Image (tube, rainbow, N blue to C red):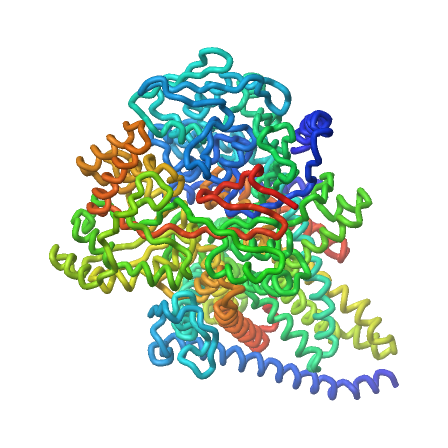
Amino acid sequence: MTSKLHMILATTAIAAASTAASAEEFTDKRVAVAITETISGYNPYADPVVLLGSVWCQVYGCITRYDWEAGEFVPFLAESVETLDELTWEIKLPEGLTRHNGEPVLAADVVHSIEYLGTNPGSGKSYLVAGWESVEAIDDRTVHITTATPDATLRDNLAGVAVTSKALFDELGDGMFREAPFGAGPYMLSDISIGEHMIIERNDDHPMIRAQNPQQIMFRIMPEPEQRVTALANSEVQIAQLVPPQLRPRVESLPNARLETTNSVEMMFLGMSPKTHPWDVKEARQAVAHAINREAIVAAVLQGQAKLLNGPVSEGQLGYNPAFKSPYDYNPERARALLASAGLEGVEVTLSTPVGRYTADRQIAEAMVPMLEDAGFSVSLDTPEWATLWANVQQGNVPFYYMGRGSMIDPSRALHQYFATGGSPRLGFSNAELDALLAAERAEFDPAGRSTKMQEAVVKLVDEAPAAFMWQHEMAWGVANGVTFNPHPADQVNGWEILVE
Amino acid sequence: MLMYLSKRILGAIPVLIVVAAVVFTLMQFAPGDAVNMLVSDEASEADKAAIREAWGLDRPPLVQFLSFLGNAATGDFGMSFKYKVPVLELVLEKLPATIELALASTLVAVLIGIPLGVLAGARPGTVWDSIASAFSFAGISMPNFWLGILLILLVAGQWHLLPSGGREPWGLNLPTITGFNLVDSVLQGRWDAFVSALKYLALPSIVMGTNMMGIIAQMTRASVQEALQEDYVVTARAKGLSGSRVLWRHAFRNALIGVVTIIGLEFGALLSGAMIVETVFAWPGIGNLLIQGIASRDFPLIIGLVLVYTGLFIIVNLLIDILYTIIDPRIRVN
Amino acid sequence: MHTQSSTAAHPGRWARLRKSYRQMTGFKALFGLGMVALLLIMSILSPFLAPHAPNTQDLMSAMRPPDWVGPHVLGTDHLGRDILSRIIYGSRVSLLIAVAVAVFASLLGVFLGVVGGYFGGRIDDAVQKVTEIFWSFPPLMLAIAIVAFVGQGLLIVVIALTAQRWIPYCRVTRAETMALRDREFILAARSLGASSWFVILHHILPNVTLSIIVMTSFAMANAIIAEASLSFLGLGVPPHITTWGGMLSDSRAYISSAWWMALFPGLAIFLTVLGLNLLGDALRNQFDPKLKSH
């Protein structure tokens, strides 16, 4: 099934090589990356997994990307993304931008890609373009987007828009993703074996590519942490995603590899749905926040590899206020008193947790049970299979759960989704004051002003406590010696940022 | 023979339909569907409803099932929700890996199990018998995932002798002909690929074959012992025929029928074992695919895989019945 | 000459063979009974035997290695729970599931087998068809599907494991019933006007009991492994119930940092299943050497 793809790529590779051969000595080294998630096929719009989104952006090119050094979203495929007025944005494409097969990238492609994302049933990320009134090509290099309400988060959304060819789609339909996966990114799609791996190959012509970037990168699915570390030790892979705390000493002791760590922007929290009893009582929610001994859990279960949160965000994220301290210290007496003041001693609750989804999730939830009981709750623990739990959470049928939420460089979307009235049924939380603060934040285009407004929303949110904010995991990656890779707080593996000796 | 074969194959069709119906019914109980699993965290209910409609999940279950049957009759098993490729194509692509592993496991089981059983059966009551019996009972009682974990830890993790998982190293570049790596490498004269295929096969096939090995050893032991008590064997021995010749000529043939039966009976267990062993060793077969399919509620994929599993099971049993007639001409089919 | 010498050699060899056979059977039976007894004692007396409560956590002493003289003889797990105590309490679930599956499976299987074998005809055809369909599912796949789609819980695990376990009971009792049906004493009872159910209850069932006992031993062994497999895939009983399979599943993430978390529960499963298999084998040799498979 991949032979046809191979043939097309072989011809383009030869074409590319002949143009770039004289330029400089490109390395022919390859890098294999062990990843935790499965790859859902050829369609770049289908997969909501963050890491794979970053892979598709390398193949097709996304309109913007987050620049970790600058700390802001910058144009990636586009030349510029600017606001014309509160509701209108202009995307400019660079002159002479072409795909791997030589065909030009046009404004019509951008319009087509946004339309596909928004309306095609093959899209799993239509939320990205929700609330956009119109998208039109002004000329071959210019696109205008009009939003229904002022939306300062648009550049963030555009970072998820991979631009595919309208002409190829008109010719081949969804088949183009397989038969003609020609993008304009720094890497080209080379092979996909479903459920196993995905291989991308360097596009030597791309301006972001440097000579030491690996010639090929293979993303190999290895769900088990032991497996990833063993493969790293055996030099079967050069980069291993998500090394859990208990395996860090092993990676550190490897002669051929090392650990690279980074913060995550994924907030881990205990969600409490106020639609259900006792979580309709604010004191009960605050009692939970006081009852959990976060320091002990981080020390023992996570072996220190997490950063406690004072709210939904931490340093480096929008809305972080270094002066703001969480009012909820570990204080079982206070928790008991709060629960008693609402007359809820001994109230029965069920804590649900996924298993194997987040670092030590089940173990953490197990450790929380005696702490909650100590505060006067009567707790039973529920560990449904992920598919079941996730479906129920999304429908708002789980009263009390341990969960994570990533993609929070800009926390706006996540906070609206979980805590704004009507944002989603997940918690069913509703507070007019918080709604107003969140709406104000989203309509503010000045970054500094937005941060201040976000901080106000965070203070209100923490006080209302529809969720008890726990920590952000410190993410560790195993990296082979001879390979330079500095992980980012989001799960991204960008070929142009990997260097091999 | 032809009549018999066609009758058996036709007889399998209603079984397959009922199996599909059972699985389909079970799926209706499932809270959560593929749309919740595969669409982003942030999709709205309206978006999800649109996708459900596009995937046909909004129709009544009975209609869904009947339309599935209708399409299946023409060889169309639908598209995988998650991978967006035809189920049949995906299954056919992964099937050789599982069959290769299952055959290798069976081979391991036979190659260890039969000598072990003969050893025990030929000298009952000796130390050899005790050792062989202990080994076979241990094999039967071993939880295979536990054995798999221990072997990965020791052989791959500590001693670095064999790979920890997967099926082939990156960059092997072995063009696919049959999908069986061992066969493909021989056909293309690629000895490096052959050796690598063996290395990757070793641990999973040992783990998967252990239970069957124990059962085969016991079966062989019993048959050999039984055969040695038969009058004609006693007579042959008395006539001065050497012990080992008698053993191989008579006792062994007797045991072989038992072994073939066991293979047939245990093949289903082996395929279920594949679901776990493939998960432990990241073996890219249909067992692994099925576990992933269940986790993401990929209904077309699940049904397709269940039918393949069941069909495989039925085919093996049919082959076993035919094999009987070859080993023992006294047995006639039907 | 030849014949004479061979008959002369015969009794000695046979005696030896039989003796060794008995010894072996004796050992198997002893080991098997020992393991079953141990399982029973552990599960009934767990509160008295276990040095700690199975779910008491002590995060400060998590992942301690085995210490033959210390408070945690077999070490502690990632939450500081005592592994020995958890193995002792875990025996309860293993035993409960094994017994429940064996009871349900034998009730269902024997009922269908005896009815099909005794009445024959259409009833038998129907029973045969049902058996064939359930037999077509690779074992465990049906169980996985049931637990994954219907939900977690002790009862669901029992149902899921029973779904195919009844088949061997049905097959064996059906065959035996068919053989018994035409025997003189049954024919006599029928000619004296005994009802079918009377014959089944008083004449057929007592005669198939031995096979049922033998099969039950194997069924229990099988159920214990199957439960552990389901737990391993994260599809077992809920986590507040301590099970060996659940412990093994937990250990997966710690295998190279805390080998004792994987070794001891695995060993407990292995030895218990080994005991049940040996016991079953000994029983089979004792009662019914003809009963080969299952």
For image coordinates 54% across by 57% down, the residue present is A226
In the image: residue A44, left or right of residue C243 = right
Q: Note whether B325 is above or below B131 in the view shown.
A: above
Res A155 visible: yes
Q: Quadrant of residue A58?
A: top right
Quadrant, the N terminus of chain A: top right
Of A244 and C46, which appears nearest the observer?
Answer: A244
Q: Note whether B47 is above or below B98 in the view shown.
A: above
Residue A54 in the image, given as x and y percentages of width and height: 50, 36
In the image: residue B136, left or right of residue C37 = right
Residue A121 in the image, given as x and y percentages of width and height: 44, 27
Residue B117 in the image, given as x and y percentages of width and height: 70, 70
**Numbered marks: total:** 0
Res C110 visible: no
Of A501 and B105, which appears nearest the observer?
Answer: A501
Of C262 and B247, which appears nearest the observer?
Answer: C262
Q: Quadrant of residue C69?
A: bottom left
Residue A77 in the image, given as x and y percentages of width and height: 51, 26
For image coordinates 29% across by 41% down, the residue present is A426
In the image: residue B282, left or right of residue B63 = right
For image coordinates 21% across by 51% down, the residue present is A285
In the image: residue C81, left or right of residue A226 = left
Q: Note whether A44 is above or below B18 in the view shown.
A: above
